[in-house]
Image (cartoon, helix red, strand yellow):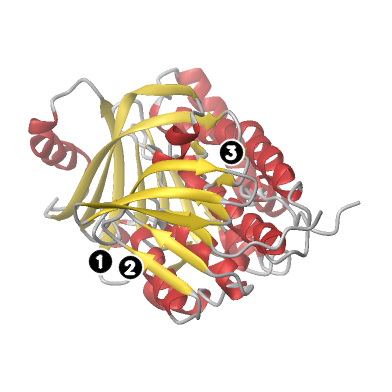
Amino acid sequence: MLMNTTRVVVAGAGPVGLITALGLARAGVAVTVLERESAIVSSPRAMVYHSGVIGGLDRLGLLGDALRTGVKAGSLDFLAYRTGERISMNVDVLAGHEPYPYNLHLGQDKLAAIALEHLRRLPGTEVRFDTTVTGLAQDSEGVTLTVASGGESTELRAGWVVGADGAGSAVRRLLGLDFEGMTWPERFVATNVRFDYGAHGFADANMVLDPEYGAIIARIDHDGLWRCTFSEDSSLPLEDLRQRIDAYFAETLPGDRKYELVHYSPYKMHQRAATTFRAGRVVLAGDAAHVTNPSGGLGLTSGLFDSYVLSEALAAVALGQAEDDVLDLYADERRAAFLDQASPRAIGFKQLVFHCADPAQLEQALTGLRAAASDVAVQREQLKVSEPLATPSLLGRD
């Protein structure tokens, strides 16, 4: 039987939650977004969007604002720290083969803010900050959420719920779903710094390969702000982190090494996925469903691919235009895309950048990169890194 439900509640006002809500609202579904924080979280996190996800931003009307705020990035370098060898690739080789032959660099908080602005323009939408999901119960007609805000607890009724509330997802925990996988013994330290990397030959995006000083460095904006993410042992005390950041830059920065540390954020890294991405009338997306180390920029990329296909499918279900078993397809295919594609690729990038202690293995990797850099066709295929992570529309399949 086709189901005609009403409002969808999205837990989480990160980019995946807000973009899912925007897709639903643009299709005519009433949406409420719940966020436990008081505002969009601004700590340094994901910021690289591969060419394959940019089309979805364009379809949702976000791309113009995103390009005005972020960086249209066209270059990627691999730098062997100890030898100084630099291998360059140019995303422009995708021109004529991809509709968006560039990557986008934009802090995920900036993308979330853009999506929030667009969402609030649409009728039937509501966004509640300082609101925590504390209870969840389902029946044949919908979902009852218990939410806490301002010291009071109330109930909220919805036809469907999307859990997009991050790796520590309250929705996932309330469903009793395991988050299977592993946690890395290292932590990442993401820093936003003002330093003119470009004047020292750095590309828009850079992978610095070294077991001690490995890093991922990328231009954030056109006003001198860059992201430098490095790795350290997670057992090191956080109270000394600022001193270790200064020591890292004292060792690795070229030139006069004068820089301004604008923001920094340490965080654990995981390779995990929920046992299922659907439980009745609740579906998971983004980090609530799966988390990966951010090497290669495949975490938020995967989450956006979740959002694009889920918002279309769930809107059709909520509006009575599709059977709800299309959400089983979503759950199965997006979980497989993460486990079979995104997670292994991110592990590969992490090993290349931060675990290249074996000279023979490093030379083998560099040989492959040199070959790609010298052959446009090979380089083009290497740069289509996000394509295998995508899922085509789930609607209208036989």
Amino acid bearing label 3:
Ala
CB contact under 8 Å: marks 3 and 2: no
Q: Secondary structure at mark 3?
A: helix
| Disc 3 residue crowd, few under 14, some 14–19, many 20+, Cα 10 Å | many
CB contact under 8 Å: marks 3 and 1: no
Residue at 34% from the left image edge and 61% from the top image edge? 109
114 lies above or below 14: below
Residue at 29% from the left image edge and 27% from the top image edge? 212
Question: In the rendered picture of this protein, how many numbered marks are placed on residues?
Answer: 3
Residue 323 is tagged as none
Badge 2 is on which residue?
221
Badge 1 is on which residue?
224
CB contact under 8 Å: marks 2 and 1: yes
Amino acid bearing label 2:
Asp
Residue at 37% from the left image edge and 37% from the top image edge? 168
Q: Out of 10 and 398, give the one closest to the viewer.
A: 10
Q: Residue 79: in sight, yes or no?
A: no
Residue 21 screen position, x and y as percent? 51, 64
Residue 170 screen position, x and y as percent? 39, 40
Residue 7 screen position, x and y as percent? 55, 64
Amino acid bearing label 1:
Gly
Quadrant where the N terminus lies? bottom right
- In space, the residues marked 3 and 1 are separated at their CA atoms by 31 Å
Q: Residue 193: in sight, yes or no?
A: yes
- In space, the residues marked 3 and 2 are separated at their CA atoms by 26 Å
| Disc 1 residue crowd, few under 14, some 14–19, many 20+, Cα 10 Å | few
Residue at 52% from the left image edge and 57% from the top image edge? 158
Q: Out of 191 and 156, give the one closest to the viewer.
A: 156
**Mark before the other along the chain sequence, 3 or 1:** 1
Residue 342 is tagged as 3
